[in-house]
Image (tube, grey):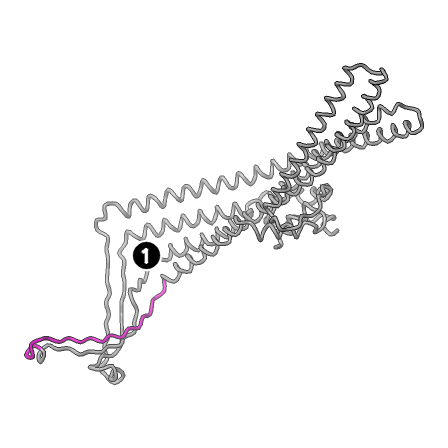
Amino acid sequence: MRGEDIGFVRATVKGGQLDTMINAALCRSPDYRLAELNVRLARAQAGQSNSARLPRLDGQIVKSKQRFGDPALDERYQQDLSMATVGLSEFDPDFFGRLRSLAAADGLRWEASQHGRDAARGALIGETLRAYVLYSAAKEAEAQAGVVASSAREQLRLAERRQALGMIASDDLRDAESLAAQADANAAKAAEASKAQERALRFLVGFDSALPKPNLSLFVDGSGDAVRYGGLDSSVLYQRPEVLEAEAQLQAAHADIGAARAAFFPSIQLTTSLGSASESLGGLFSASKAWTFTPSLRLPIFDFGRNKQALDLAWIRQKQGVVQYEKAVQRAFVDVADALGSRSQAEQAYTAARKKELAAVGKTGRLIQRIDAGLQDAMDRPQAEIDAANATADRVAAQQDFALSRIALSHAFYATAPARPSPSDSH
């Protein structure tokens, strides 16, 4: 992983326990590989445009013979000529900047492709972390659904015994049967959801890669977020890869306007050669010198509006670039605002769910102690265990939302100017 990748992950996850998983996703992702190829493609195009501005030196060897069927014509017009030359071929001095503008546009598109690759990289890391959070939460939810189903079956067993002894009515037994059936259905649904989340994560990191153990607690510590992001200047958002990509694309579109304008002016091309000519190949180095100089001027007179339409097209694309840039900037601010708002709400919900879980677990523990001491009916134990498991499931859901909100916040600042490190980053 690169520096900005490590900063993203460390701002969200404690330690480096997920680094291997993220590296596997980066190596496997077809979207990221395509972004890498787009960079290589844009670099090659930029190199080609820069090369077009430089003179091309060509070498040429020509052997020419001319014979006629008439001896009289042969004596007078026959040719036997060898020539070797080296020179410039169709060199454009680019007096009006057309080639310069085209090279600048392609160079800026190369830069934009690099920012696009960085944006794809950050999105992939964020997607992988989100998939791991959903996978971990689904595993914990599956475990708690299993606890509820087991306790519901125990509750049904006790109800059947009591109904046989005439201690409860048939309606109470049917209620217990219904609750047990619903709990089993919920457990099966949770198991299937867990498998689906595991498949989604394996799709990102590879089905042959070992998954890290599910552990939502890796995302709980958000104590450093206030230090890391608090008081940051909003100008850092202009360093987001998406914004930089849109900016480079806008500059490239502006350079295209310069190239389209230059097409209205004359185009000059120079072709020169210097060499020697002889009646035989062996005499080229001692033969007479030969040279050519062929300038050409092409002036657009009437092209049925082709150059005008090309300029209009360049202006429209430039205006599109302005809109795309504005959209990227607005998206950056919206992402940060949404992430900050959801993080605060998710943290409050997680804190409340955690307190509820602790209260339910503590209540269940005290109830079991009273049952063991013979001070309370054992029939109350399954329901208390169900209540505790449901409270834990609620905490898992709130913890999942809190983790996702922290990932969204870190992703919103991905590859921007370095945020202030928090004390927890050193651990």
Quarter that holds the N terminus: bottom right
> Could you say where residue 299 lies in the image, as x and y percent from the top left?
23, 55
Res 222 seen here:
no
* Residue at image coords 27%, 47%: 306
- The residue under label 1 is which amino acid type? Phe
> Could you say where residue 52 lies in the image, as x and y percent from the top left?
36, 61
Res 68 seen here:
yes
User: Nearest the camera: 251 or 155?
Assistant: 155
Which residue carries the number 1 mark?
96
User: Nearest the camera: 65 or 162?
Assistant: 162
> Could you say where residue 99 lies in the image, as x and y percent from the top left?
35, 57
Above or below: residue 416 compared with residue 76: above
425 displayed left or right of 252: right
Residue extending furthest toward the front: 164
Tell me which segment is drawn in magenta. 53-73
Query: Splitting the image into 4 quarters, where does residue 398 fall?
Result: top right
Is the residue marked by circle 1 packed among few (<14), some (14-19), or many (20+) residues within 10 Å?
Answer: some
* Residue at image coords 40%, 41%: 319
Above or below: residue 331 compared with residue 172: below
User: Nearest the camera: 39 or 93?
Assistant: 39
* Residue at image coords 91%, 29%: 372
User: Nearest the camera: 167 or 407?
Assistant: 167
Question: What secondary structure is found at the residue carrying circle 1?
Answer: loop
> Could you say where residue 11 lies in the image, as x and y percent from the top left?
67, 47
